Image (spheres, rainbow, N blue to C red):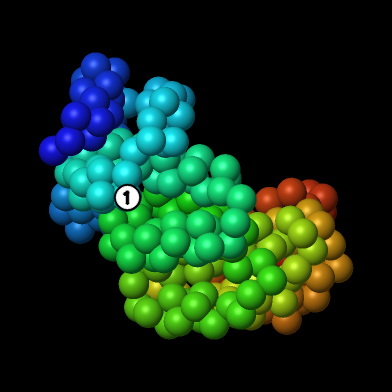
Amino acid sequence: MSELTAQVIAALSDKANPVKAAFFPRFFKSKPGGYGEGDQFLGVIVPEQRKVAKAVFKEISFEEITVLLQNKYHEVRLTAIYILVYRYQKLKTNSEQKQLVEFYLSKLDYVNNWDLVDSSCHHILGHYYLSKDKSLFYELADSGHLWKQRVAMISCYYWIKRGHFEDALALAEKLLHHEHDLIHKAVGWMLREIGNVDFEVEMEFLRKYYKTMPRMALRYAIEKFDPELRRQFLKGEL
């Protein structure tokens, strides 16, 4: 382990909170049978992780980031994710961005809880692939791997905010009847974000699918609707 890697882990360990360390396994479902089964926690809050990441992201190597991503503690891996995002956002050339994107994709097995996915994929993959072929995301959606499928859906957030809905809608349709509620939530969230940009686009999708889509996805999608319209959706009255 390098001195810089050890410095990151020590800085996080110094901020460990036993109360939060006891709470996080329930929050992130790391008990047997949960989606985060086996994950371990120091009990470090996100603002502290971001501080650590900002202190080192310019100088830390990909090899050192790999060590952090392979760490057993959730917060160490999430800090590595923040490091990658901060570095990516400072890159100026397509070749530099491509190198980081390829590194990120090679480490997706360690992006293994919803907060690691949601904190990174749209900032990195969403940005990089905005004007590029998006077949990668359909491959991820078809992978049968929970976190890669969530990466496929949440990466759309970057495109949605810029008025590009086609792939988000296609991926939402592909993942709409997934068996896991974390994908239902992701689909519903992205549909809601589409509605924030273009209400009629979301409504067209919902009119087609709302009676058969998972209830959790529907609730997320209509969360900010007028109460009466939300009631009509939930009662199947449209």
The answer to whether one can see residue 221 in this image is no
Res 235 → quadrant: bottom right
Q: Position of residue 92 (x, y in %)?
A: 61, 50
What residue appears at the point 45 percent right and 81 percent down from the top-left corner? Answer: 139
Res 3 → quadrant: top left
Q: Which quarter of the figure is the C terminus placed in?
A: bottom right
From the viewer's perspective, is 229 left or right of 77?
A: right
What residue appears at the point 25 percent right and 44 percent down from the top-left corner? Answer: 64
From the viewer's perspective, is 70 left or right of 48?
A: left
Q: Residue at label 1?
A: 62
Q: Position of residue 142 (x, y in %)?
A: 43, 82
- Viewer-proximal residue, 68 or 217? 68
- Viewer-proximal residue, 180 or 92? 92
Residue 217 to residue 115: above or below: below
What residue appears at the point 81 percent right and 70 percent down from the top-left corner? Answer: 201
Residue 99 to residue 30: above or below: below
Badge 1 crowding class, 10 Å Cα cut-off, few under 14, some 14 to 19, many 20 or more, is some
- Viewer-proximal residue, 234 or 143? 143
Q: Position of residue 134 (x, y in %)?
A: 58, 78
Res 122 → quadrant: bottom right
**Secondary structure beneath label 1:** helix
The answer to whether one can see residue 12 in this image is yes
Residue 191 to residue 73: above or below: below
Q: Which quarter of the figure is the N terminus placed in?
A: top left
Q: Amino acid at mark 1?
A: Phe
Residue sitting at the far left = 1
From the viewer's perspective, is 159 left or right of 122?
A: right
From the viewer's perspective, is 213 left or right of 44?
A: right
